[in-house]
Amino acid sequence: MTTTDLAAALAAGRLRIVDLTNQLSSSTPTLRLPDPFANLIDFSLEEVSRFNEPGPFWMHHNIHTGEHIGTHLDAPVHWISGREGRDVASIPPERLIGPAVVLDFTEQVAADPDYLVTVADIQAWEAANGALPENGWVLFRTGWDRFADSQEAFLNADETGSHTPGMTAETALWLATETKISGVGVETVGIDAGRGAELDPPFPAHFHLLGNDKYGITSLQNLAELPTTGAVIVVAPLPIVGGGGSPSRIYAFVDAA
């Protein structure tokens, strides 16, 4: 398909765009690390002018936000294992656009919010749907996006920590070293499970994926609107020089029904 074909397919309604991005505001759910660890600031807008004396014909805001707020991308330099790797600005654009596959774990997560995706889970999916695509994105659908407007429900924390799904350490290592994917996408606040600190190594998705030049995207929405295979995803972070992550607009092209 040429770029002209793509434009024609969109204009004719043969392709549609699914927005996978949570809206970004001061109420967007964000990660909360326990003491003594420091937290990022939440997103906020600071008014500079609004059709008034400082700016009679325009509205201007300063944006205040952490890198890893809302729907965002994790670059390798975000994690100690990838600290010699790429920052957000140096990720090749061709690694940010590619085929997307959706692995559905909504049933398992409904029964156990701490569910961890196993290598056997992914291999069973491959047996039914084919190999994970080269330069592709593996998206874990868990139904967690239904909590994306509630900080409390999104983090699902109690005295033992946050209870959200993720992947085993074995799965993270396998995806990082045995596949040629670009990255993994999740509906939760981070690519690791809520209790990922208890695994070996701690936070293995971050450790293995980012340490092997693979990327993470989080807080995804609307994965239920994507086919199991056949979508193309576009990940559009800000090219922050030295940045370990960036809020991102993420969307997918899918064949119209």
Image (cartoon, rainbow, N blue to C red):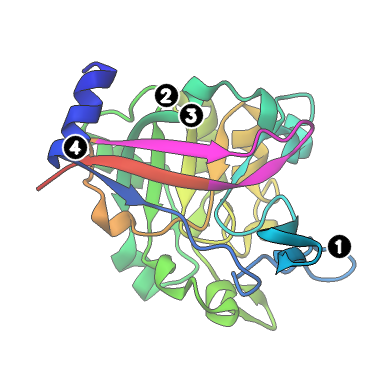
Q: Residue at x 37, y 52 (%)?
A: 19
Disc 2 designates what residue? 135
Residue 190 among those drawn in magenta? no
Disc 3 designates what residue? 182
Q: Residue at x 72, y 69 (%)?
A: 32
* Chain-order first, disc 2 or disc 3: 2
Are discs 2 and 1 less than 8 Å apart at CB?
no
Most common secondary structure along the magenta stretch: strand
Q: Position of residue 20 (x, y in %)?
A: 40, 53
- SS state under label 1: loop
Of 225 and 45, the residue lying toward us: 45
| In front: label 4 or label 3 | 4
Disc 1 designates what residue? 38
Image check: 135 left or right of 77?
left
- SS state under label 4: helix
* Chain-order first, disc 4 or disc 2: 4
Residue extending farthest right: 36
- SS state under label 3: loop
Does residue 115 appear in the picture of this structure? yes
* Chain-order first, disc 4 or disc 3: 4
User: Of the numbered discs in the image, which one, if any, rests on residue 11?
Assistant: 4
Q: Is residue 197 above or below residue 127?
A: below
Real-space Cα separation, disc 4 to disc 3, in angstroms: 29 Å
Q: Position of residue 59 (x, y in %)?
A: 67, 60
Q: Residue at x 71, y 50 (%)?
A: 67
Q: Which residues are magenta?
A: 231-248
Q: Is residue 116 above or below residue 28?
A: above
The amino acid type found where label 2 is placed reads: Asn
